[in-house]
């Protein structure tokens, strides 16, 4: 490997900059050249490729977002477009690529590997929905941002004897909702993996708890279920309790990354370069069983995971 390319793809996540910085500096320390590819696979196809040196990544470790920017590029699902992407890499002398993103981005990386470009995926998503790893870049910052926001909504809900439906991100997964639900002491956690859509039972629980003297009712609703405004309206109509929906939205993706996200993203970025230099390809970096490790991309994409049953059951007991 002589020249390593780095790109961020899919949704942005706080800590991606720390990973980019680690890729650049680890590669330079091993005498490699580094090229930054802007806007994910879309930028690769447009040849938005820049030379990177140690100063290109100065003063970015504490910044949210990604200096390389990111994009979704549906075209890249087409085989002839993937081949064109590999040819552009070769034209620019890029013989190894680090792809920072989610499962979709890893599928793109897998295709580049099939066309002879050495690729390593680094898990970057606030959703934690990558099966081979118990950590993804951005999740820690996102849950802390959401937790602080939910604390604030909780204060005002208590003062007004209100029911608050608070919607958090996570796409099809309920990890952010589970963590915040427990950390914020929510009365209900609605996650796509578990929610049975039995609204009559939900409303009955709200009425019961109101009788017991609960001054607020905090419902953490995952993006994968959605319809928070509708749910709040139906709860108000059925219980008479003033109900409001708050959709936290994109604030959860931004902000300065937490210490954990900076540290883990730095190790994972450097690890990706180390295994590329050892001659590995079509691998994804992970954190599992307390250690940083790597998996074959094909195997990683075939794995599944879900929220912990045990944690979900405990959350119900702690209300
Ligand atoms: P996040 O979970 O944060 O949204 P992601 O990487 O899963 O991240 P996607 O939108 O699924 O986000 O994928 C990002 C990009 O990866 C796509 O826009 C596309 O360029 C590429 N990609 C996705 N699926 C494939 C595929 N099957 N083959 C090739 N490229 C793909």
Image (spheres, rainbow, N blue to C red):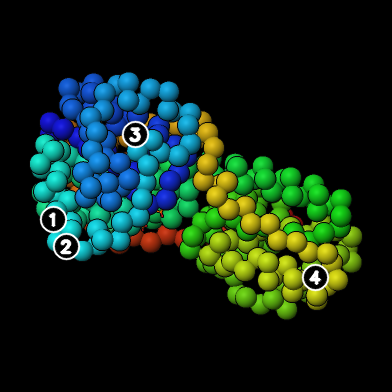
**Secondary structure under badge 4?**
helix
Q: Is residue 213 above or below residue 286?
A: below
Q: CA distance from mark 4 to mark 3?
A: 47 Å
* Residue depth check, mark 1 versus mark 4: number of the one nearer the observer: 1
Separation of marks 1 and 4 at Cα, in angstroms: 55 Å
Q: Element under label 2?
A: helix
> Is residue 112 in sight in this rendering?
yes
Q: Which residue is mark 4?
A: 236
Report the residue marked by disc 1.
83
Can you say whether 61 is above or below 158 in the image? above
Q: In the rendered image, which quarter contains the N terminus?
A: top left
Q: Residue at x 43, y 55 (%)?
A: 129
Q: Which of the marked residues, 1 or 4, is nearer the chain's N terminus? A: 1
Spatial separation of the CA atoms under disc 2 and disc 4:
51 Å
Mark 1 crowdedness (10 Å alpha carbons): few <14, some 14-19, many ≥20: some
Q: Marks 1 and 2, how far apart in space?
A: 6 Å
The residue positioned 48% from the left and 63% from the top of the image is 172
Q: Are marks 1 and 2 in contact (CB under 8 Å)?
A: yes
Q: Which-is-in-front pick, marks 1 and 3?
A: 1
Mark 3 = which residue? 20
Would residue 206 be found to the left or right of residue 166 on screen? right
Quadrant location of ligand 1?
A: bottom left
């Amino acid at each position: 490997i002589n020249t390593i390319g780095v790109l961020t793809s899919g949704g942005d996540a706080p800590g991606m900059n720390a990973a980019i910085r680690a890729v650049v500096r680890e590669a330079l320390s091993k005498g490699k050249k580094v090229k930054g590819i802007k806007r994910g696979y879309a930028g690769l196809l447009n040849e938005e490729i820049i030379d990177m040196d140690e100063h290109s990544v100065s003063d970015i470790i504490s910044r949210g977002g990604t200096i390389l920017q990111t994009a979704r590029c549906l075209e890249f699902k087409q085989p002839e477009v993937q081949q064109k992407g590999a040819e552009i890499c070769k034209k620019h002398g890029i013989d190894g690529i680090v792809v920072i993103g989610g499962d979709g981005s890893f599928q793109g990386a897998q295709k580049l590997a099939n066309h002879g470009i050495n690729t390593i995926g680094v898990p970057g998503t606030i959703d934690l929905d990558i099966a081979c790893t118990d950590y993804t870049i951005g999740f820690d910052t996102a849950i802390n941002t959401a937790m602080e926001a939910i604390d604030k909504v909780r204060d005002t809900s208590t003062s007004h004897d209100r029911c608050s439906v608070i919607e958090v991100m996570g796409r099809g997964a309920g990890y952010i909702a589970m963590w915040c639900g427990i950390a914020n002491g929510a009365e209900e956690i609605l996650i796509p993996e578990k929610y049975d859509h039995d609204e009559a039972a939900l409303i009955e629980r709200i009425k019961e708890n109101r009788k017991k003297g609960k001054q607020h009712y905090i419902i953490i609703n995952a993006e994968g279920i959605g319809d928070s405004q509708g749910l709040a309206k139906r709860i108000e109509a059925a219980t008479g309790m003033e109900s409001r929906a708050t959709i936290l939205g994109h604030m959860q993706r931004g902000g300065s990354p937490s210490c954990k996200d900076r540290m883990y993203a730095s190790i994972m970025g450097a690890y990706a370069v180390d295994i590329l230099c050892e001659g590995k390809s079509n691998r994804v970096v992970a954190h599992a069983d307390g250690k940083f490790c790597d998996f074959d991309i094909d195997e990683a994409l075939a794995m599944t995971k879900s929220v912990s049953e045990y944690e979900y059951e405990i959350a119900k007991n702690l209300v």
